[in-house]
Amino acid sequence: MERIIATYHIETPIAPEDAAAILAGEQSSGTFVAVPGETEELKRRFAARVESVERTGTVTAPSMPGASSPNGTFHQATVRVSWSIEQFGTNLPMMVSTLQGNLYEIRAFTGLRLIDIDLPTSYGTHFRGPAYGIAGCRELTATHNRPLIGTIIKPSVGMTAAETATIVDTLAGAGIDFIKDDELMSSTANNSFEQRLDAVMDVLERHADRTGKMVMYAFNISGEMDEMLSRYESIVDVGGTCAMVSINSVGLSAVKRICDEGALAIHGHRNGWGMLTRHPMLGIDFKAYQKIWRLAGVDQLHVNGIANKFWESDDSVVASIEACQTPLFDQPNPLPVVSSGQWGGQAFETWRRTQTIDLLYMAGGGIMAHPMGQAAGVMSLQQAWQAAVEGLDIDQAASRYPAFAAARKKFEGK
Amino acid sequence: MERIIATYHIETPIAPEDAAAILAGEQSSGTFVAVPGETEELKRRFAARVESVERTGTVTAPSMPGASSPNGTFHQATVRVSWSIEQFGTNLPMMVSTLQGNLYEIRAFTGLRLIDIDLPTSYGTHFRGPAYGIAGCRELTATHNRPLIGTIIKPSVGMTAAETATIVDTLAGAGIDFIKDDELMSSTANNSFEQRLDAVMDVLERHADRTGKMVMYAFNISGEMDEMLSRYESIVDVGGTCAMVSINSVGLSAVKRICDEGALAIHGHRNGWGMLTRHPMLGIDFKAYQKIWRLAGVDQLHVNGIANKFWESDDSVVASIEACQTPLFDQPNPLPVVSSGQWGGQAFETWRRTQTIDLLYMAGGGIMAHPMGQAAGVMSLQQAWQAAVEGLDIDQAASRYPAFAAARKKFEGK
């Protein structure tokens, strides 16, 4: 029978082997005292199994405060635990409750982090995965041989639908591939979802008639289930190609339901992610996290960016891009969304470290605040990527491309 | 215009006032560089506002690793930030993305925790809150003047539907008020949801015909949206009174959709909660968390228990019970679900510290492994509560009640 294997980093004052056994018991057939009915056959079939325990070191202070160790030592280890697929089948929320449920509450752990999930073959058959992914998003935006260039409407909130449409008009005229609502913006008192959808799509249709290219606009539908479905339909009706959902806030079952529709590319915004991952010995690694959302069918996933304005290291960003571009079954790979404090300058390091152009490269202020205007902002990003892929360095790129040079002067001060 | 106020505990190497301003900017109209369109009028209407900053102390090591401070000092503070209701209206996922979104990623914070949310009056009109809550669950189970006594079917997974029904039969015969699936159990290879629903409800109907009391069984419907709705309907069709959802795994939009149906009491299981709250300077406090799920309409919310088997302190458990029983608008209060390693022995301290019987008091092994059988297990819990409320101590209770005395011998060894 197929098994799902979860890899954790654990920290514990007791023997890591014992801590892993507690985890396996708590998350399958165990309770705090033996009960009737817990037969050997039942345990054979349904008990979670500790597959391996690899000790990685010791520390003298617990990662989570409030715990003590009799000898002042806390062991760190990588453990692999497996469950029979018979326990929860292909039910994703049940998989999450099993792999990430009450185990974080277990007293024996002073640190616990889900690092990876090995999924069984049947998941590749049952789940379609992203309906569009990288290839589909390239197709929808007619963008090939370079990253998709995108931006976020800023200011995040406060503008009217008409003001938003005016900016969209400029950006579409400048040859942008993708535009999105900010994650803080869905429907405000002065800019309803419906008004913005109509105003933006009018503009984009007009540009598409002229150029043959429909710019992808990610309308933020995050909200209640029925409203999301109805807004999704509205986007389809007026010829839009993308809806955005804040995956952590909306939650797994509703996001899966939206993705199942399959008529739009789904832009998965991971705001709230910092809470789940920022402490290195708590929560979940992106490698595991992105697998869950790929199974749900998300087409685009945020990965932060090189030299971002947030806490995340470049190494972590690079690992996240690689995770999205590692095949899962024969499903389309999701498009990594690079953003946060980005302008063309980071294209060079992003390319050097990832060697991929299969990215949605997003700049907010980096485009909207370009000194020569937003059209030059878009152009400067395309130039940066062209230069990076051709092997130019940042100085050479600035000499060759005036729009990029102007961006550099603005954002790097030289 | 109404505002929503969020209270955070923060930790930062910079001045807390500056860090709070960064948070407010990031979560409303800000970007990393000023952009056209960010007018004064727009900022007046939509900018988040720092309402107060109260410094609470300094530490010399950051709560989140990886950060440094020029002078080695990290400030801790309680800050209150407010948003105009015009930014997201009554859209709960958007509220979560605003109050708990990218702010956890901000570099200036070495700790950030959402402590409380002050909701505006209009939320009390817009959201119904729990359809049943404490009073409704008492009504549905015909249980008055004492806590509802409940149990979790154990072993968590592995038994057949028929084996489950046999246990339910014994428990119902013993006068239990509430039984639930384990959060790890929804539909297994040897115990499908439908089989279990039929087998359990047959038994409960039979007992209800005899006693006039329908035991509440929380069938775990956690899963995909449409399947949850269809299972919900199946429960209603056969006369069940409750459905269980793992709120973190299922997610907010889908849980709200389920609660909106209003035909069943919704048992909200918070597995995964440890990940969101265990680090004291990261994540979210239960006080804020439970408000979100009350607005969604959850009728029963887990709060752990006194002297539980997990990491959580008694103080934290008591605070959670109080949070659930603090009125929110004029909505029914949700029923706090006390569980984890419970038997009758904790009734005394639970009563002493909370002075409430408006609880669903759950014992898994505490009932199922009672030395005189499960009926005596149920009885021992009722006895413990009766004794506690009457002012008896644990020794006096054991002298008066043989079933409780037997439980004490089993679980306390004396």
Image (cartoon, coloured by chain):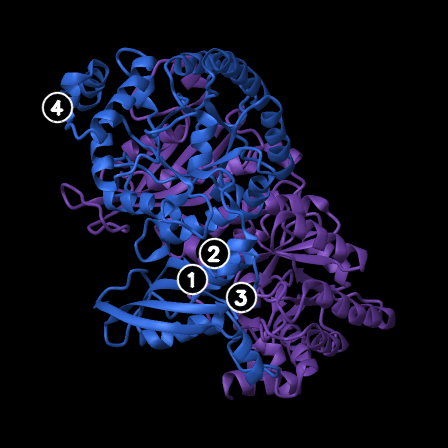
Chain colours: A purple, B blue
Q: Are marks 3 and 2 in contact (CB under 8 Å)?
A: no
* Three-letter amino acid code of the residue under disc 3: Ile
Same chain? Circles 4 and 3: yes
Residue identifier under label 4: B395
Image coords of residue B344 (percent x, y): 25, 25
Q: Would residue B284 appear left or right of B39 to someone viewing this image?
A: left
Question: The N terminus of chain A is located in which quarter?
Answer: top right
Q: Where A113 falls versus B125 (above or below)?
A: above
Q: Earlier in the sequence, mark 1 or mark 4?
A: 1
Q: Are marks 3 and 1 in contact (CB under 8 Å)?
A: no
* Three-letter amino acid code of the residue under disc 1: Tyr
Q: Is residue B183 visible?
A: no
Same chain? Circles 1 and 4: yes
Q: CA distance from mark 3 to mark 2?
A: 24 Å
Same chain? Circles 3 and 1: yes
Q: CA distance from mark 1 to mark 4?
A: 49 Å
Q: Residue at x 73, y 54 (%)?
A: A136
Residue identifier under label 3: B85
Q: Residue at x 69, y 77 (%)?
A: A163
Q: CA distance from mark 3 to mark 1?
A: 22 Å
Q: Are marks 1 and 2 in contact (CB under 8 Å)?
A: yes
- Give the crowd class for mark 3: few <14, some 14-19, many >=20 residues within 10 Å: many
